[in-house]
Image (cartoon, rainbow, N blue to C red):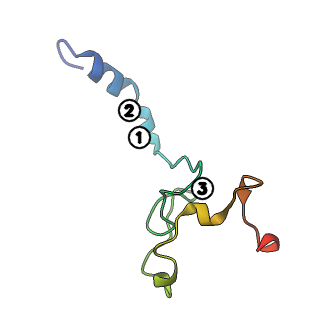
């Protein structure tokens, strides 16, 4: 930590396990999280924006996948 670390650096060093463990999105309303090219999937992976027909969904965000009434993911049955 050095000779005399500042309060900020001590806090950063104490929280480094979060960065090492990986961080994920907190979906919440999902209106700012793009569906493509972001690591929002449970296993930390993303949906590649180079997939076939990606141009149809490149402007969509996570809120288009969430049912705001039930606060749950849309399922095949609800679509």
For the residues bearing labels 2 and 1, Cβ distance under 8 angstroms: yes
Which residue is rendered at x = 48% and y = 64% of the image? 34
Residue 6 in the image, given as x and y percentages of width and height:
23, 16
What residue did someone put label 2 on?
A: 16
Looking at the picture, tell me which residue is in the foreground, 78 or 50.
78
- Earlier along the polypeptide chain: callout 3 or callout 2? 2
The residue carrying pointer 2 sits among few (fewer than 14), some (14 to 19) or many (20 or more) residues within 10 Å by Cα, namely few
Tell me the quarter of the image containing the C terminus.
bottom right
Q: Is residue 78 left or right of residue 64?
A: right
Which residue is rendered at x = 24% and y = 20% of the image? 1
Looking at the picture, tell me which residue is in the foreground, 22 or 74.
74
- Earlier along the polypeptide chain: callout 3 or callout 1? 1
Residue 7 in the image, given as x and y percentages of width and height:
28, 16
Q: Marks 3 and 2, Cα distance to the nearest angstrom?
A: 21 Å
The residue carrying pointer 1 sits among few (fewer than 14), some (14 to 19) or many (20 or more) residues within 10 Å by Cα, namely few
When the figure is inspected, residue 26 is found, relative to residue 56, above or below; the finding is: above
What residue did someone put label 3 on?
A: 42
């Amino acid at each position: 930590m050095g000779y005399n670390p500042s309060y900020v650096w001590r806090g950063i060093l104490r929280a480094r396990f979060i960065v090492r463990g990986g961080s994920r999105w907190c979906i919440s309303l999902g209106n700012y999280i793009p569906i493509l090219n972001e690591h929002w999937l449970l296993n930390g992976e993303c949906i590649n924006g180079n997939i076939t027909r990606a141009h149809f969904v490149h402007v969509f965000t996570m809120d288009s996948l969430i049912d705001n009434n039930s606060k749950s993911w849309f399922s095949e049955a609800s679509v």
